[in-house]
Image: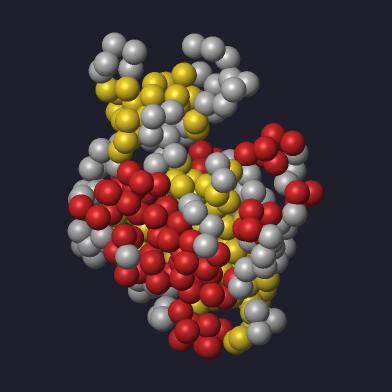
Amino acid sequence: MKRAVEPEACALARWEGGDVDAWSRRWGVPRLLLFDRVGSTNDIASALARDGAAAGTTVLAEEQSAGRGRHGRRWHAPAGRALLLSTILRPRPATAPGTLPLRAGIAVARAIESCTGARCGIEWPNDVLVDGRKVAGILCEASLGGDDGGFVVVGIGINVALEEADFPDGEVRRRATSLWLATGRPVDRGRLAGAVLRELMTGPGHDAGQLRGDVAAELARRDTLRGRVVVEPDGRRLGVGDGVDPDGALRLRQPDGSVRRLTAGSVRGASPDDPEP
Ligand code: BTN
């Protein structure tokens, strides 16, 4: 192992039986950095992107000491039991950047389905759910515009082999799962990473234009909030899910029939123990 990029980061020469060059070739990425432990793979990928790294450049770690979730939350995963990676995209056109998280969600959902057969839903904007529980989280950090068009770092955490006891408390256990818990079968992380990267680079993450046609139809099929009461994390009611607009905004039907559009935020489908409106 040699020191690299961040003070605490240790590069791995091998991962899951293959060396860095072999994985890089197999996944078709221009550059791959593998670490046993880093602060956050998104930080490393962002620094590389600012230095001009090519689209597809990917950072993968077995463990993160400062893994980030959306809205400043922490993202914890036990070492070696998740797939933790960040990849750089340079989507063209990027006329509807609000669609990026959704596009990344579709890519991850497709990859999980192709490797495990587990049906995946997407909870706006980009949580990937199996059996109604979160199996993967995605953090898109974009710096679009400028002379070179900019970049987006797509950070993905997939719960691959977590056991019940790996979730920090009962609340998380109720809302989260892993591929192992959901399917009862082990998952090949090398194959899963390859499928994720392929879908990101050649599938819906390729551009960040408006959601139209097949991608919009696929999102509608996977939308776990459609027709459900949607609430804020504290259980306050926001409306009934009415699909997603072409720019990526969540449509929420109000009691008077009007539609409220949400372009950012954290929401979930109501559960029976939420307070009545
Ligand atoms: C969320 O659901 O809130 C998003 C979680 C994203 C976690 C991944 S793990 C790899 C990458 N590095 C990070 O620090 N975060 C993302």
Left or right of 234? Residue 214 is left
Q: Is residue 27 above or below residue 164?
A: below
Task: Using the rendered image of the protein, determine whether residue 215 is visible from the camera's viewpoint.
Answer: yes
Task: Using the rendered image of the protein, determine whether residue 39 is visible from the camera's viewpoint.
Answer: no
Between 27 and 180, the one nearer to me in the picture? 180
**Residue 206 picture quarter:** bottom left
Q: Position of residue 184 (x, y in %)?
A: 68, 60
Left or right of 123? Residue 241 is left
Residue at the outermost right position: 165
Residue occupying image coordinates x 53% and y 88%: 22
The total of numbered circles placed on residues is 0
Between 198 and 110, the one nearer to me in the picture? 110
Q: Is residue 186 above or below residue 236?
A: below
Left or right of 145? Residue 167 is right
Q: Position of residue 245 (x, y in %)?
A: 25, 38
Residue occupying image coordinates x 59% and y 64%: 83
Residue occupying image coordinates x 49% and y 54%: 119
Q: Position of residue 79 (x, y in %)?
A: 72, 63
**Residue 242 picture quarter:** top left
Locate the N terminus by quadrant.
bottom right
Q: Is residue 111 above or below residue 103?
A: below
Q: How is the image coloured?
A: secondary structure
Q: Is residue 87 above or below residue 103?
A: below
Residue occupying image coordinates x 30% and y 42%: 248
